[in-house]
Structure formats: structure tokens, C-alpha cells
Image (cartoon, coloured by chain):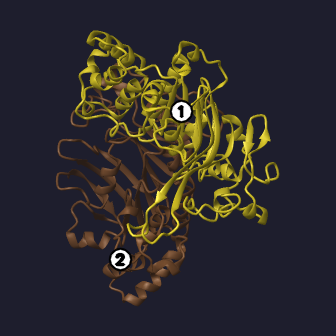
Chain colours: A yellow, B brown
Amino acid sequence: MAMLSDEARQWKLEEPIIAVNELKVWFPVRSSALSGLRRKPERHVHAVDGLNLEVRKREIFCLAGESGSGKSTTGLAMLRLVSPIEGSVIFKGEEILVLKRNQMKKARRWMQMISQDPYASLNPHMTVFETIAEPLEIHGIAKSRKERRGRVIELLENVELTPPENFMNKFPHELSGGQRQRVVIAAALALNPEFLVADEPVSMLDLSIRAEILNLLLTLRDKFSLTILFITHDLSVAYHIADRIAIMYLGKIMEIGSAEDVINKSLHPYTKALIAAVPGSESKEKLWKKITKAEIPSAVNVPSGCRFHDRCPYSTDKCKAQEPELVGSHDHLAACHYVGQI
Amino acid sequence: MNDLRTYYFTKQGTTNAVDGVSFELIKGQTLGITGESGCGKSTLAHSILRLLPPSARMVSGTISYKGLNIITASESELREIRWRRISLIFQAAMNALNPVRRVGEQVSEAIVYHEKTTRSEARRRTKRLFEMVGLDSARMNDYPHEFSGGMRQRIIIAMAIACEPDVIIADEPVTALDVLVQAQILDVLDSLKRELKISMILITHDLSVVRQISDFVAVMYAGKVVEYAPVDQILKNPHHPYTQALIQALPQISGGRHSLKSLAGTPPNLIDPPSGCRFHPRCPFIMDRCKLEEPQLMERATGCRSACFLP
């Protein structure tokens, strides 16, 4: 496997480290046990519905959107933790969706995940040492206990849980929320991954701790040349941490570009409405008031044409009939028929 | 007449969850109470309606509502106040609707119970309430599961204003809602406040929500109010080091990207709070005096009240 060789690790800066093409993740809806017998056409939740994106080396790429927009499913699919029905996920030039079980296990070394809830993602019966050392054992990285201990100490220092000796033998219940999230990050970093999916890593944390964890992720990115897919519903968090932002809606990207462009020069009416709705935004126009339906439609019956048309204040007949492509220039694209006119 | 003055001092078991908090709420105004988890803000909200769990006790202080001390009020006096005069929108209330009863019934039930009106009169009023909170009154006969989270939260707000209260206590009313829904719910609360001249106590950990609809803000830390000021004042020119730290840690979408400053340390254990100023172990401006003496809320030249020895 080229992916696992040393040459492969020398990936060039600015190049996509992971790319997804025409990714579709659909989940079947089972309304009742009998519906299978009645031969009703099977319905699906279109969680991710034809998504293309590239995450570049050393970049923090934010997927933002409302709940139900498919951003978490995208993150899971990029780690092959859910199976897409269509499309490809290319990690450093290789398709990971076709890898065999043992190949995938090796590939997972380079791709790790930080989840939202530091209370649920740590095993309450395992000490901090055991949690962080477990991936080292599974992948046979540090063979002796002494080696593992050295590595765990190093990792705890990296996530600023110092002195490490004070934390190694603690159980999760003895730690605060911020400290737990640091342990989760240390465990994710144990195998020296290159690509991290961070799914709402700060949304459960208090304000003062949130800033700490965001700053820690920025430091770690610089120190280890990490590439991070950062999933968040909070545009102000995205604006602070991201190099680039993609706004997702019902399984598709509505707008993508640099953090500055997407937030300060947004093109898509959906992005504009989201930004205007952020408390404290300086946007004078209360665009969100014009959004007729406050809630995201069901991903089972995706609206025709532009999937945002039934909530969009500027919708026309064209929007109902024809699905817009991502258009724009200089890396700043939006999927709207009226880009530049709204 | 309608000016509510609340001064009270409580202790919950041996945890000093709310420890010497005083404030007043003026008719038609919104007071935002903010702070990190565990600072005592929800305990404060529940104390006002005496809805505390059995382990909690209010050991001293008074909560006076139009001259009546809620702490010493009898059960029947309390019943008169609860919901009719002061209502509560609590955390995740939208999940507390009865799933097997029609939403319209649930709202009119509150009216019938508290005001002894006829069912048909209550139904008429429920219809009007639905319109006020931006719901289609034709949907009164639907069940809770047929509504989305944001719409259920509107139903809860309709219930809270059903008896035309003077005061609404809203405990994290928009937490866990999407940003567009959040903006619309805050807008409903804000317009109700203006139309019905309701006073509101808004409790939230989210400073940016506070700034959207509050007139005054009280920042709590470890069971105490550390700063109390008009909302613009507190955001532009905070006095207390804790408030300053919170604002510097707040990611903002406007005004360009700047690095977030984090606040070292964790909030103290309220069973054994630090001596002197409770913020001193985390304060960047600590002085010897802070460890020994406790600062009181003091009026500042800028118009805020802050509990800090710094000038």
C-alpha cells in the first residue's frame, strides 16, 4: 500500500489530502415492519446527496450548517464509519472505500476523530493512561509498557495536561469537561494521524473552556501539520478557526470559500440568512425574518430544483425547476442561480 | 406599583449555589443573567418561584414581588403567583409537552386551571395566543410530535403568557435550537415583551443571546453577581476581570478575526469556595487583598456595578 509508505507521508502542502467525489449517503426509512411486505417503494433519508469537496494539507476546513444538513454524516463517511451508496473518498490518492478490512485498519492510523461529547466518548472504567495507550497497543506502535508510558506522557504534554503524572491514573469522572476533551484529543493524536475529523468539539463546553480548546487545536495543527475537518453549527466558531468554510444544506454544499469570503462577502441567500441570525451579527437586514419556514425540510423528500427554494425569499420558477451548480471565482463558489444579483 | 425588587440570599445544602444575590427587575425590562455552568443561574431562577428540589433551601434573604415576600408566602399565595403573575420557560421545555394530548388543550388547560374560565373562553384565548407567537391556530388540534422543536418552543411560550403574567423567567429558552429558529424565537420573546409590557429574566450561558434582547445584564460567578450593568456597557467596556475574560473568549462574527483569549483554570468547587474574591485563583490582576477580603458590588463611574477592588 503506497498510502502507508514513507513517501506517501511526504505529501505536498496545499494539495488535497482527502477528497470526496459525488458522495451520497442515504439511509433507508423503515416506516413499519410490514412495509417491506407491501412492496412499497423504499424511501431514503438523503443525508449526503452528491457532495464534492477537497481538504488541503494543513488546513482547518469547516463544514457548517443547521442540524440535519448532513455535516456529521459527511465526516463519518470520510472516515468510512458509514458506508456511502455512491461516490468516492480519496485519501492521499487512494480510494479508501474499496480497502479490505486489514488495509482499512492500517489506514485508520492516519485518520482519527474527536467527537462532540467528552462525557460519552470516554470509557468510565478506563484511566486516562489506558484510554490514550489503547490505540498504541491495537496498532502495535509502542510495544513495551515503558514505551507506551513515555508516549502517553508526551501526548498529555502536547494537550497541556501538565504535569502528566497527575492525570495518568485519573478516571474520567475526576476530570472537568475541558480536561476530558483534552484527553479525547490526546487519544486521537496517539497514532500521529494526519487527518482529524472534529465533530462539534466545543459545543458542549463553557465559553472560557471553548476558547482554550479552539486555541489548542490551532496550536496542534501548526505543531503536527494536521489537517482538520471541523464540523460546527456555530458560524462564529467557524469564522475563528477555519481557513475555509463550506455551508451545507440538505446534503449539499451551498457555498464554499475562504472564511473571510464566506462570512464577509457571502454570496448565497442561505449563508446570508444564517449570518444575519447569529446573535450579535452587525448585519442590519434581518434576512432571517424573510425565511418563511424556520425549519429545515425533511431530507426524505428533498425539494426539487434548488433545495433551498421553499425557504428562500428570492425564489423564482427557475429555482423550483432547475438545480443550480456551484459557480463563482477564486475559490469562492455558491450554488445559486442568482449569484451576484442578490 | 409593578416594580419588582428582589433581594435574596440562599444556600443549597452546603453548596453555596446562589450566595448573596441582589437585583431588581423593572417593569417592561429584560434582565439577562449569564455565567458558566454551575454558577448558580438556574438555581436562582427556580428560587424565584420556589421550585427548588427538597435538598435545596433558601436560608436567608427576601424575594419581594409587589410587596409580597415569596420566600415566606403561603402555598395559596404562591399558587396565585405561579404562572398567573410569574411564569417560567424552562430548559428543554419543548420536550415537556404531553405527547398524547392535543397542544391546544394543553394551553387552554393552563388557563382553565388558573383562571377558572369556561373551556370555550379558554379556547378562544388559546387561539389568540397561537397567533401572537406566530403559530397557525388551525393546528391547535395537532399533537406535539407533529411540530418541530422550534414550534414546540413557541407553544411553550404561548403557555407561559397564557395568564398574562407580569414576569417571565426564561431559562435557556433557545439552547439546542438551530440558529435561524433561535433568531425567530428571540424575536417572538422580544416583541411579546414590548407588546404586553412583560418583564423578563433571561437566563443563558450564551453571552451573544443575552446581548440580543436584554436591557441589563448580571454576570454570575460561583454563586455571586460579579458585575451588573446595561447591556451595551458590559459588552463594550466590561469592568470585572471575569466579564472581560468572557468577552475576550467569545468568538464573534463581526469585526474581523482576532485570536481568542482563554481563561486559565476551572470554576471553583462551591462546597469550599475560595476565600476573599471567589475569582482570585483565576484572575490575571490578583492582589494580596483579593485573597483575604471579599469585594462588594460597587457603583462605578461608567454606570455599572462591579465586585472588584480594581478602580
Q: Position of residue A243 (x, y in %)?
A: 63, 30
Q: Which residue is mark 1?
A: A96
Which SS class for mark 2?
A: loop
Which SS class for mark 1?
A: loop
Between circles 1 and 2, the one closer to the viewer is: 1
Q: Position of residue A179 (x, y in %)?
A: 35, 29
Amino acid type at circle 2 is Arg
Q: Pick the residue in front: A136 or A106.
A: A106
Q: Give the residue displayed 34% in from the left and 17% down from the top.
A: A152
Amino acid type at circle 1 is Ile
Outermost right residue: A341
Tell me the quarter of the picture where residue A124 sits. Answer: top left
Q: Give the residue displayed 27% in from the left and 44% down from the top.
A: B17
Chain identifier of the residue bearing label 1 in the image:
A
Q: Is residue A103 above or below residue A74?
A: above
| Tag of residue B101 | 2
Taking the image as shown, residue B83 lies to the left or right of residue B253, namely left
Q: Pick the residue in front: B63 or B269.
A: B269
Q: Is residue B143 above or below residue B276?
A: below
Instruction: Give the alpha-carbon distance from disc 1 to disc 2, as whole Å.
Output: 50 Å
Q: Position of residue B212 (x, y in %)?
A: 55, 51
Q: Position of residue A303 (x, y in %)?
A: 64, 62
Chain identifier of the residue bearing label 2 in the image:
B
